[in-house]
Amino acid sequence: MTKSLQSAAEIIIGKVGKARGLDGTVKIIPLTDFEGRFDNLTEVAVGGKIFSIEKVQHIGGEIFIKFQNVDNRETAKTFANKFLTVPRAEAAPLEEGEFYTFDIIGCEVFDSAGKIGTVANVFKTGSNDVFQVVGEREVLIPALKSVIKKIDIPNKKIVVDSAMLEEI
C-alpha cells in the first residue's frame, strides 16, 4: 500500500556506503522500492549537494555510482553514510491506491468516534504495512482495505473502520 521514500520536498532514494576501488566509485544502499531507479539518473543530491553522475554499475546484485569530478577514494570516503535525494517531482509514479510512506506519515487518523491520533511511522511487515498511530495511546493499524476506508493525502486524513480494529 505504501512505498518507501521519506521527505516532502526532497525524497531519499539511497544511502552511500563504502568507497569501491581507487577511482571515486561508491557503493549505494537503495532505500526505494523501485528497482532500476538509479539507472537513468543524471544527477542526485548527496548530503544536500548536487552531483552529476558519470556511471552507474550493477555488480553482483549491488549498485555502484561514480560521480563526476570525484576521482579518488579519499574524496569518495567522505560521502559514506550520506543520503541520496532527488526532488519530489522526480518521484516514480504510483498505481491507484498506492501512497508514499512520507505522504502517510503525519496524516491524522479518524474513526466513527473521532480522532485516534497521527501516523508517526509506517512499518513494513512483508504481508502488509502497519501504521503506528500516536494519540492518547499508541495504536498499530494494519494497512488493509478492510480496515482503511479512505486515505486523503491532500488533507492529510485517514479514515478507518473502528469495528474492524476491534476484531484485530
Image: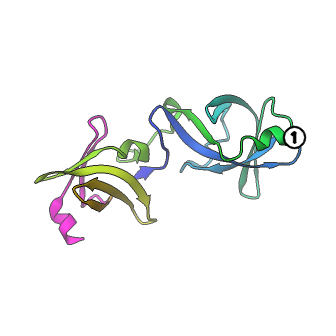
114 horizontally vs 57: left or right: left
Q: Residue at x 39, y 47 (%)?
A: 98
Residue 145 part of the magenta segment: yes
Q: Residue at x 19, y 65 (%)?
A: 164
Mark 1: which secondary structure?
Answer: loop
Question: Which residue ends up furthest to the right in the rendered image?
Answer: 22
Question: Which residue ends up furthest to the bottom in the rendered image?
Answer: 167
Quadrant of the rendering where the C terminus is positioned: bottom left
Residue 42 part of the magenta segment: no
Q: Residue at x 58, y 37 (%)?
A: 85
Instruction: Specify start and end residues of the magenta stretch as a single range.
Output: 144-168
- Residue denoted by label 1: 23
The colour scheme used to paint the residues is rainbow
145 horizontally vs 123: left or right: left
Residue type (three-letter) at the residue carrying disc 1: Asp
Report x, y in % for residue 40. 66, 36
The front one of 84 and 36 is: 84
Q: Is residue 30 above or below residue 126?
A: above
Q: Quadrant of residue 71?
A: top right
88 horizontally vs 145: left or right: right
Report x, y in % for residue 159. 21, 50
Q: Residue at x 81, y 29 (%)?
A: 69
Report x, y in % for residue 53. 73, 33
Q: Is residue 156 above or below residue 9?
A: below
Q: Quadrant of residue 165?
A: bottom left
Report x, y in % for residue 22. 89, 44
Q: Is residue 31 above or below residue 129?
A: above
The front one of 60 and 113 is: 113
